[in-house]
Amino acid sequence: MSQIKIYGLSKNLAPIKAKLSDVIHSCVVDALHYPEDKRAHRFFPLDPSDFYYPAGRTTKYTIIEISMFEGRSIGAKKNLISLLFERVHQQLGILPQDLEITITETPTHNWGVRGMPGDEIDLNYKVEV
């Protein structure tokens, strides 16, 4: 299970939202062996007055926050991060210094999905990759 939030300036995020979602999803599928039909992305387009970012970044600065079940290997998470930097740059022109990625893992029992705790759900994919 994963939920992904994407933050950026509205004027830059709006035109690329669908493509960015596709790129992120391709990375999750490849790195975490996620099913093609599992996608939960939320976009947070921000006004410049609501988005302060570090010096040395451009207006394309984008934050991707990934919340997911615990259990993935360090290698799988590093692969996901590498794929995101590579593909977002190649396909959307966002430089690695303008992309920030965080992964937060949560025990399955702390999720509520389809009316039950996450540790009681029968998933159609493997979490331990």
Image (tube, helix red, strand yellow):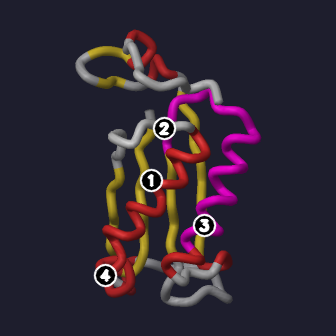
Which numbered marker is on residue 6? none
Q: Which residue is mark 4?
A: 15
Mark 4 secondary-structure assignment: helix
Q: Amino acid at mark 2?
A: Tyr
Q: Which residue is mark 2?
A: 34
Check residue 81 for magenta coloring: yes
Q: Which residue is mark 3?
A: 100
Q: Which residue is mark 1?
A: 25
Q: Amino acid at mark 3?
A: Glu
Percent x, y of residue 82: 69, 59
Q: How many discs appear?
A: 4
Percent x, y of residue 22: 40, 61
Check residue 18 for magenta coloring: no
What secondary structure is the stretch in magenta mostly built from?
helix
Q: Nearer the viewer, mark 1 or mark 4?
A: 1
Q: Residue at x 36, y 16 (%)?
A: 117
The mark that comes first in sequence, 1 or 4, is: 4
| Contact between labelled residues 3 and 1, with CB atoms less than 8 Å apart | no
Segment colored magenta: 67-88
53 left or right of 6 in image: right
How far separated are the C-alphas under marks 4 and 3?
19 Å
